[in-house]
Amino acid sequence: MIKNHSLLFFKKFILNPRNVGSVIPSSRFLANRMVASAMWEQAENIVEIGSGTGAITRVIANKIKYGGNIILFERDEEMGQTLQRDFPHFIRESNALTN
């Protein structure tokens, strides 16, 4: 398993560019901007579709209140395993269409 998230993401893009939307994962600046308008004090359940290697998930993990449920959907098995390793307290599913 590749430990470097950017390298793993790039490898997956090269192997299957139709399923991976970018050459590299979102930067922490982009991830922060993407979740900035969420009402974190009210958020109890969060679903992230296409979690990749967890760039946005890291920001969510820092913002969610204790006890919130987070479900991560990632179809790529290797990236999914990375998510499970990095975020063992979140629920990881492979496909949002079949669950």
Image (cartoon, rainbow, N blue to C red):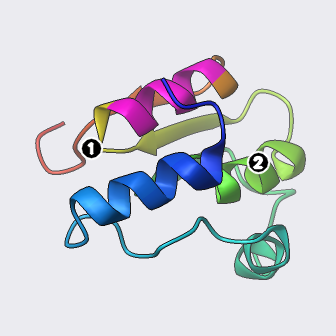
Mark 1 and mark 2 lie on one chain; the one further toward the N terminus is 2
The spot of residue 73 in percent (x, y) is 38, 44
Locate residue 96 relative to residue 68 in the image: left or right: left
What mark, if any, has residue 49 been given in the picture? none
- The one nearer the camera, 58 or 27, is 27
Which residue in the protein does label 2 denote?
58
* Residue 78 location, quadrant: top left
- Asked if the magenta segment contains residue 79, the reply would be yes
Q: Amino acid under label 1?
A: Arg
Question: Vertically, is 74 above or below 37?
Answer: above
In the picture shown, does residue 22 fall above or below 94?
A: below
User: Disc 2 marks which amino acid?
Assistant: Arg
44 relative position to 23: left or right: right
Residue at the image position 30 percent from the left and 31 percent from the top: 77
Q: Label 1: few (<14), some or many (≥20) within 10 Å?
A: some
Q: Position of residue 20 (x, y in %)?
A: 33, 66
Along the line of sight, the residue nearer the viewer: 66 or 15: 15
